[in-house]
Amino acid sequence: FEISDGSTDLSVACIKHLIGSHIVLQFNITSRHKQGSVRMVRLKVFCESNDVNVVSVEAERTLQTLHPGGTGNCYTILSRGQSSGTSASISCELRYGIISLQGGSRNKEFEEEFPLEDVEIGREY
């Protein structure tokens, strides 16, 4: 499902995978930026519940570079706790840097952060 609103330079969709006692969030990212490369794309994930018995972030994998119009993936691995039958809400924040490439040369670099729609982890996960 799509979790970005179209106002950012990147489009983000999330796919949830259940692997044993882990939930893998696969974020498919497409660049809509036409004037530069996107670097260090990462999804910062915050578990609404501070209870590690429900779900906790175990690992994250960033996307190093995304060229104009390109597509890539970021991943977050969540560990399901002992209360895995409980649903949880996960907040996501898209963070990345843009290297502006105007006139064929590298001009400036700036950082962006955007909150995205929450990801619901249902009882079935």
Image: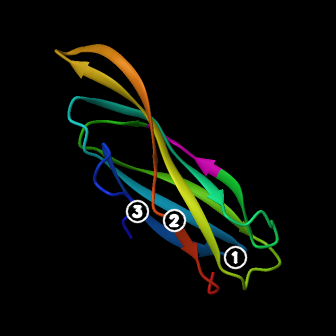
As drawn, the residue found furthest toward the left would be: 103
Residue 29: x percent and y percent? 37, 52
Tell me the quarter of the image containing the C terminus: bottom right
Q: Which is more toward the observer, 74 or 99?
A: 99
Which type of secondary structure does the marked residue at label 1 adopt?
loop
> Magenta region, mostly helix, strand or loop?
strand
First along the sequence among labels 3 and 2 = 3
Picture quadrant where residue 91 is located:
bottom right
For image coordinates 25% across by 21% down, the residue present is 101
Q: Which numbered marker is on residue 3? A: 3
Q: From the viewer's perspective, is residue 37 above or below residue 77? A: above
Residue 71: x percent and y percent? 32, 49
In space, the residues marked 3 and 1 are separated at their CA atoms by 25 Å
Q: Which numbered marker is on residue 52? A: none
First along the sequence among labels 2 and 1 = 1
Asked whether the residues under the numbered discs 3 and 1 touch, taking CB atoms below 8 Å apart as contact, a structural biologist would say no
Q: How many marks?
A: 3
Identify residue type, mark 2.
Asp
Q: From the viewer's perspective, is residue 54 above or below residue 123? A: above
Q: Select label 3 or label 1 by which is in front.
A: 3
In space, the residues marked 3 and 2 are separated at their CA atoms by 8 Å
Q: Which numbered marker is on residue 20? A: 1
Asked whether the residues under the numbered discs 2 and 1 touch, taking CB atoms below 8 Å apart as contact, a structural biologist would say no
Which type of secondary structure does the marked residue at label 2 adopt?
loop
For image coordinates 22% across by 29% down, the residue present is 35
Identify residue type, mark 1.
Gly
What residue is disc 2 on? Answer: 118
Tell me the quarter of the image containing the N terminus: bottom left
Q: Which region is colored magenta? A: 60-64
Q: Is residue 28 magenta?
A: no
